[in-house]
Image (tube, rainbow, N blue to C red):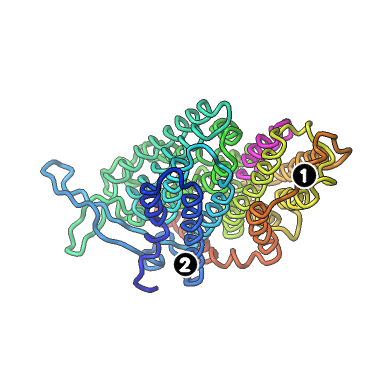
Amino acid sequence: MENFPILSFITFLPVVGMLIILFIPKTQETVIKSLTLLVTGIQVIAALIILHGFNYSLGGINDPSSFQFIEKFKWIDITGFSWIGRIKVDYFLGIDGLSVTMVLLTAIVTFIATLSSWNISKSIKGYFLMFLLLDTGMMGVFVALDFFLFYIFWELMLLPMYFLIGIWGGPRREYAAIKFFLYTLLGSVFILLVMIGLYFSSTETLADGSKIFTFNMLSMMDVHNFTANGILSPLNPNNLRLIAYIALFVGFAIKIPMFPFHTWLPDAHVEAPTAISVILAGVLLKMGTYGILRVCYPIFPDITIKLVWFIALFGLINIIYGALCAMAQKDFKKLIAYSSVSHMGFVLLGMASLNTIGISGAILQMFNHGTITAMLFLTVGVIYDRAHTRGLDDFGGLATQMPIYAGFTTLAFFAAIGLPGLSGFVSEAFVFLGAFGSGSIRTLAVIGTLGILLGAGYMLWTMQRVFLGSLKEKWNKLPDLDFREYAMLIPLSLIVIFLGVYPSAMLNLMNASVNHMVKFMMDAKTVYGSLIGF
């Protein structure tokens, strides 16, 4: 496998599946579904092969020699006669400890979401074409190391997600889809503007010794590659770099979603089909925090260190506000949507610690939240398929009628609460350990622990309303889980339990990269200080 382009394979395999589906008659619904399941299943196998061949000891972040499974060749190369000169864009893929976990998460969640999509009955062919295109966009974001290529994959997700919500969603699907589109497009415009500014502010040295402007994200992470007169160069004494950082951060924060840019999420979740809610919560939200770690932190270390308290503050707001909103919900799906807002706040808090324990906890929380929330949305989908309602007050006593379903849901609830022995506990514990270890945000961390209490409150109250008490007569014939639903929930349950008992399996993957990132951020004080007086 040394010379096999496995990152291109795992990224563009869904496109191959799309091309095959185009030639399959729309009446062959089982063939289309089976092919999609095969494609996403092969992706999982490819992700496991990547995991098996991954070298735990290499750091990555800003060191090209430490990235693994690298694929790099010239993609766009145009020479002009204006002041812009030569424009060169590379097809540059690679992974390190930050991205390998997200590649694995994307493969697993997409495969589970394919199983969840099996009961889609409207425009089957169109649905799975959009589904596979979305898959390629998500995977590409986590493996791209050229900013231009990263942005293409980032934008590629927007179109299929818009149609997946707007066509196959609930009664208010058009409103939810347009709201999602406009919010995300606004963030994309911010990212695009900063990307262009960074391009004309940083250079890359070619083999012949000449220098050209570059989209290479690793080159942008070296302060010595910035031109003195570049508008976003740390060598240029202006406030544009701070403005650019805020714009870039907001662009990624919309996807998290961070307060106050979160309002698109509940609508999108409630109206989206179950499988798309699973992908939205399991993968798409993580792309926001991944973008901050991959782009904002190492390219703008000077601004990050200055604003880290505010990052923690917004993380705290997410934790408390999201939990309070979840507690007020009467719609099962909207409650889980607001719980995602709260739990992504823990990721922001851990990232703001700027130490190994906190950032490791944040990345682990990204993975754990992806699997746990996928379980939660799947369980909501199970009961909605049977009862055609998501009202929490409409149920009661379901544990006696659907005991196996109640068992899987309880496992997901307690994992979300952070019960010791389940994956959610470890990541949240690391987040708070890291935040307490950072003196500047210690007070915010103390307040943030209220989120654990509030989370337990709304989760346990939900369990009481849905599963305990007397069973209503109209629910006394609801069937328990079927084979497809077992196939969706068992793998996620095993992951939640395994990482709760043995979190090192995931922490070892990211440890070298997180250590390298923390050292890089701390060294920035010295390097930038000598150049710009930071």
Residue with the most extreme bottom position: 2
Q: Kindly identify the residue that appears in the image at 49 percent across and 56 percent down.
A: 40
Graded by Cα atoms within 10 Å as few (under 14), some (14 to 19) or many (20 or more), the crowding at tag 2 reads: many
Q: Is residue 217 left or right of residue 320?
A: left
Secondary element type, mark 2: helix
Q: Kindly identify the residue that appears in the image at 72 percent across and 50 percent down.
A: 481
Query: Is residue 456 shown in magenta?
Result: no
Q: Give how far across and how far down residue 447 sits, in percent.
A: 71, 42
Residue 529 shows in this picture: no
Most frequent secondary structure within the magenta stretch: helix
Quarter of the picture holding the N terminus: bottom left
Q: CA distance from mark 1 to mark 2?
A: 36 Å
For residue 50, the mark is 2
Q: Give how far across and how far down residue 525 sits, in percent.
A: 45, 54
**Between residues 307 and 266, which one lies in front from this camera angle?**
266
**Between residues 66 and 181, which one lies in front from this camera angle?**
181
Kindly identify the amino acid type of the residue bearing the numbered disc 1: Ala
For residue 150, the mark is none
On the image, which quarter does residue 311 sit in? top right
Of labels 1 and 2, the one closer to you: 2
Query: Is residue 326 shown in magenta?
Result: yes
Residue with the most extreme left position: 81
Q: Is residue 109 left or right of residue 141?
A: right
Circle nearer the N terminus (1, 2): 2
Range covered by the magenta-colored residues: 322-345
133 above or below 54? above
Kindly identify the amino acid type of the residue bearing the numbered disc 2: Ile
Q: Is residue 400 left or right of residue 443?
A: right
For residue 456, the mark is 1
